[in-house]
Amino acid sequence: MLPPPLFLLDGHMTRLVPVAPVLAWLFLFSTACAHGNPAQDERDLQQLVAVQAEAWNSGDAVAWSKDFAQDADFINIVGSVFEGREQIEQRHAAIFSTLFKGSQAKVTVRKIVFPQEDIAVVDTTHEVTGHSGLPPGVRDTEPGLLRTRMRYVMQKRSGQWRILAGQNTDVKPAP
């Protein structure tokens, strides 16, 4: 014997309303509201990258590192790993005062993917000019231009996007 179907009475108690469609509508409505605004998130991520490029161009390691999470990891173009925002900031302060002092970066966001609503993978291309040298093993992609690909993993925490991890890879010159 099957159990009787579940029903709710509407406000006037004049007709029966099936529970399943009401619950389905509530679920879909709450799910749509929970996803936030992907277009706004993309704009926020684009802005974060733009602010970081401005900080590079100013040689400001504090501003360049400010959107990293406290426990972030960063892998630079020679494979060195920096753990935590403080170490990331210190390393960038060092390069902004030596090899990359006065350099300029043009950063283009290539792709943003949201594997979850609060997680973003952001792929960028960096074109750096005006550098006085490069780390051992790194060569300009073209004369006077170092091109790199940066991949960030970001998470939205308390309404703010934070960089959890970054990896920078140099684009090798054409043979």
Image: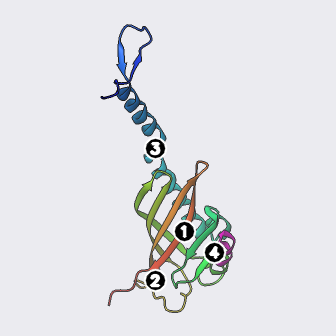
**Mark 3 and mark 4 residues within 8 Å of each other at the beta carbon:** no
State left or right for residue 91 relative to residue 7: right
- Residue type at tag 2: Gly
Which circle's residue, 3 or 2, is located before the other in the chain? Answer: 3
Q: Residue at x 38, y 86 (%)?
A: 173
Residue 7 is left or right of residue 165, and the answer is left
Q: Secondary structure at mark 1?
A: strand
Name the residue carrying label 2: 144
Residue at image x 45%, y 62%? 121
User: What's the CA distance linking mark 1 and mark 2?
Assistant: 28 Å
Q: Position of residue 108 (x, y in %)?
A: 43, 65
Q: Which portion, as a residue range, is magenta?
A: 84-92
Tell me the residue that label 1 is attached to.
Answer: 165
Q: Which residue is denoted by mark 3 in the rendering?
A: 35
Crowding at label 1, few (<14), some or many (≥20) Cα neighbours within 10 Å? many
Q: Who comes first in sequence, dot 3 or dot 1?
A: 3
Specify the amino acid type for callout 4: Glu
